[in-house]
Image (spheres, grey):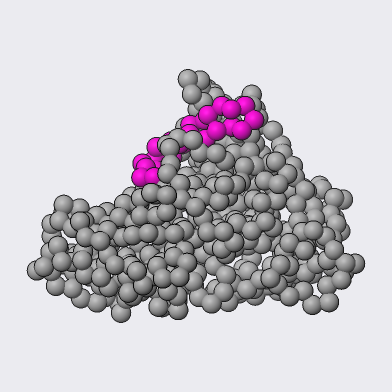
């Protein structure tokens, strides 16, 4: 249950403090971890989050929000951003049981209504650029691949239905309309960009989507019908995005575009996979190689990279020898079970000095080092493993979650179907290339909330007033997201 006062506080702080930049099809925003700083994480909450996300159904994690302008004249909608799904949809007029028009602030206190714009139901009748997507449209044909569209002939409306792992659902029909977004042009001036895209008009929702604080969802998955794919096909954005999550402070950055600094080693993404799958070749604990031959049997491409999952999950055939090898480095440790899920032990020494580093190696020599402070949580006077048995979700996959991706720059290059990872200080900046001008911009990390991104050897702005004046509530390319508890 989200605390509305926490949501309100986060909104006010972020609107007043975030300074952002978009350049030539790239964007950057700063994010906050759903559960705050790592030292504040609740093991129970982490487990519950992952159970909901990886139940039977599509992935859905809670939640990052963005604001998107839709229609002509444009209206603002607050939408969930989810990297584990593909469909972009909004709640529509006559939707049941969708919320009426409220303000986020009014929901918390009527006296605060002036602080936030209203939440909306989209009505295609009131947009001069809106049109219904018929079954014969190429978008509908692409969306329908692998799905059953009963009675969908070329002159009928193209319908959608999506179920999520926590039991929430949405169903309706597709429409085509204009979206608007802010970006920074080559001369560093704020401009308005527009694009024509197809998205779902939700007529029936269940579960959390009946919550009056949600207007819909933007799926950030890899399918050709996702919003990112549609924008990339129009040349509006690069079909690449990256994140760098600050494990210590619970913040980080997320960018859309071509990351050129630091350099990254890339490994191929598995073609036509539902999620971001890669091929893990080996696991090393200190100087010991873990036998993962049983896991590699078959296609060997059953490792998912998912920042929306809190912990990391392994098949039992991998997890047991992995933990046993780690613990063997300190043979006098006594372990105990916490909450039926977490294996813990008491320890009063430096874990990074006393326990081994774990190295995951992937195809094309990509290497991911995971240190003891990454794979262990502090608990009372000891530590607990953040690695779990994937049997809970009836899966024999390896799922590399936020736990091991902290303090790493992760690039998803969907144009070249590759994924890159590099150890990085996520409170620092990364280099983002402007594809139109070739310029490289340094975009800031979690500790640069009040600094404007700068171009090499040239300040974009030197005036503090100009800095504040360029605070933009990103509508799309610079997704200003609200991370809720």
User: Which residue is found at the position 56% from the left and 27% from the top?
Assistant: 439
Q: Is residue 382 visible?
A: yes
Q: Nearer the viewer, residue 391 or 469?
A: 391
Q: Nearer the viewer, residue 9 or 23?
A: 23
Residue farthest right in this picture? 155
Q: Position of residue 234 (x, y in %)?
A: 73, 44
**What residue do we see at 31% from left, 70% from top?**
319
Total of numbered circles in the picture?
A: 0
Q: Main secondary structure of the magenta part?
A: loop
- Is 427 within the magenta? yes
The front one of 290 and 475 is: 290
Q: Say whether residue 38 is left or right of residue 65.
A: left
Q: Residue at x 35, y 52 (%)?
A: 368
| Start-end of magenta stretch | 422-448
Residue 159 percent location from the top left of the image: 77, 69
| In this rendering, position of residue 374 left or right of residue 395 | left
Q: Is residue 218 left or right of residue 62?
A: right
Pinpoint residue 186: horizontal percent, then vertical percent.
64, 26
Nearer to the camera, 21 or 121: 21
- Where is residue 223? Give x, y as percent: 64, 58
Instruction: Name the residue: 40% across, 78% down.
Output: 391
């Amino acid at each position: 249950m989200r605390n509305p006062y926490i949501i309100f506080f986060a909104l006010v702080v972020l609107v007043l403090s975030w300074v952002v930049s978009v350049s030539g099809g790239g964007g950057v925003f700063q994010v906050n971890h759903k559960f705050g700083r790592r030292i504040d994480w609740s093991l129970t909450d982490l487990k519950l989050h992952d159970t909901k996300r990886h139940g039977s159904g599509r992935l859905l994690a809670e939640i990052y929000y963005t604001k998107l302008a839709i229609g002509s004249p444009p209206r603002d909608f607050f939408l969930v951003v989810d990297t584990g799904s593909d469909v972009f949809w909004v709640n529509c007029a006559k939707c049941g049981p969708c919320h009426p028009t409220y303000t986020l602030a009014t929901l918390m206190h009527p006296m605060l209504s002036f602080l936030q714009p209203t939440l909306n139901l989209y009505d295609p009748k009131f947009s001069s650029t809106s049109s219904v997507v018929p079954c014969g449209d190429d978008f509908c044909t692409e969306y329908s691949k692998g799905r059953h569209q009963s009675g969908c002939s070329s002159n009928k409306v193209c319908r959608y239905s999506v179920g999520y792992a926590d039991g929430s659902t949405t169903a309706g029909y597709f429409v085509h309309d204009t979206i608007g977004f802010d970006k920074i042009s080559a001369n560093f001036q704020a401009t308005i960009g527009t694009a024509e895209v197809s998205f779902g008009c939700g007529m029936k929702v269940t579960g959390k989507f009946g919550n009056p604080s949600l207007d819909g969802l933007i799926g950030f998955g890899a399918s050709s019908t996702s919003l990112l794919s549609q924008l990339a096909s129009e040349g509006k954005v690069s079909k690449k995005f990256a994140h760098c999550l600050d494990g210590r402070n619970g913040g980080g950055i997320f960018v859309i575009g071509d990351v050129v600094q630091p350099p990254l080693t890339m490994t191929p993404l598995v073609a036509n996979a539902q999620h971001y799958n890669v091929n893990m070749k080996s696991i090393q604990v200190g100087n010991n190689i873990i036998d993962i031959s049983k896991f590699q049997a078959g296609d060997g491409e059953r490792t998912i990279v998912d920042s929306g999952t809190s912990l990391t999950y392994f098949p039992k055939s991998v997890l047991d020898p992995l933990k046993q090898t780690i613990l063997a480095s300190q043979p006098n440790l006594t372990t105990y079970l916490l909450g039926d899920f977490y294996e813990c032990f008491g320890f009063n020494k430096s874990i990074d000095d006393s326990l081994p580093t774990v190295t995951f190696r992937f195809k094309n020599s990509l290497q991911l080092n995971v240190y003891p402070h990454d794979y262990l949580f502090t608990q009372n006077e000891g530590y607990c493993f953040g690695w779990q048995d994937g049997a809970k979700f009836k899966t024999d996959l390896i799922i590399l979650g936020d736990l091991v991706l902290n303090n790493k720059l992760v690039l998803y290059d969907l144009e070249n179907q590759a994924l890159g990872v590099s150890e990085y200080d996520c409170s620092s900046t990364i280099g983002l290339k402007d594809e139109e001008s070739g310029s490289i911009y340094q975009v800031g990390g979690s500790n640069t909330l009040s600094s404007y991104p700068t171009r090499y050897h040239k300040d974009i702005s030197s005036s503090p007033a100009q800095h504040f004046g360029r605070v933009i509530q990103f509508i799309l390319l610079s997704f200003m997201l609200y991370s809720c508890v």
